[in-house]
Amino acid sequence: MIGDQIDMLVPDSELPLRVREFEHLRPELRPGAIVIFHDTSTNHRIVREDVTRLTEERLLATIFPSPRGLAICQYCGGG
């Protein structure tokens, strides 16, 4: 337990663990929190696919997708 809700999260673990890091901290995220994923370019397919899945599940809304590998998202507070 962190104590306060998280307003911004930048997962930076190993590529295959980034979404698991997000999922682990998700109960602490404030609805509307900003979540920034890097390494979302086509070179790092696993992170890109995971962020796409979270968007399709409506857990995140991507507000700035960059073809260079940055995705700035907003947590929708679901789940």
Image (cartoon, rainbow, N blue to C red):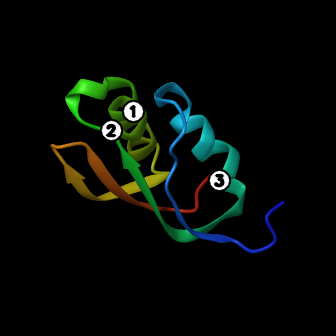
What x and y, as percent, mark residue 5?
Answer: 69, 71
Question: Residue at left 38%, top 58%?
Answer: 73
Instruction: Please name whichever residue, 23 or 57, is drawn nearer the observer in this view of the structure.
Output: 23
Question: Residue at left 65%, top 53%?
Answer: 26
- Which residue lies under the disc numbered 1? 47
Q: Amino acid at mark 2?
A: Asp
Decide: is 65 above or below 5.
above
Decide: is 71 above or below 28.
above
Gap between marks 3 and 2 measured at Cα = 20 Å
Q: Earlier in the sequence, mark 3 or mark 2?
A: 3
Decide: is 32 above or below 40.
below
Examine the image and state in which quarter residue 60 appears: bottom left
Judged from the image, the secondary structure of the residue bearing numbered disc 1 is helix
| 24 left or right of 75 in image | right
Gap between marks 1 and 3 measured at Cα = 17 Å
- Mark in front: 1 vs 2: 2
What x and y, as percent, mark residue 22?
Answer: 58, 46
Gap between marks 1 and 2 measured at Cα = 7 Å
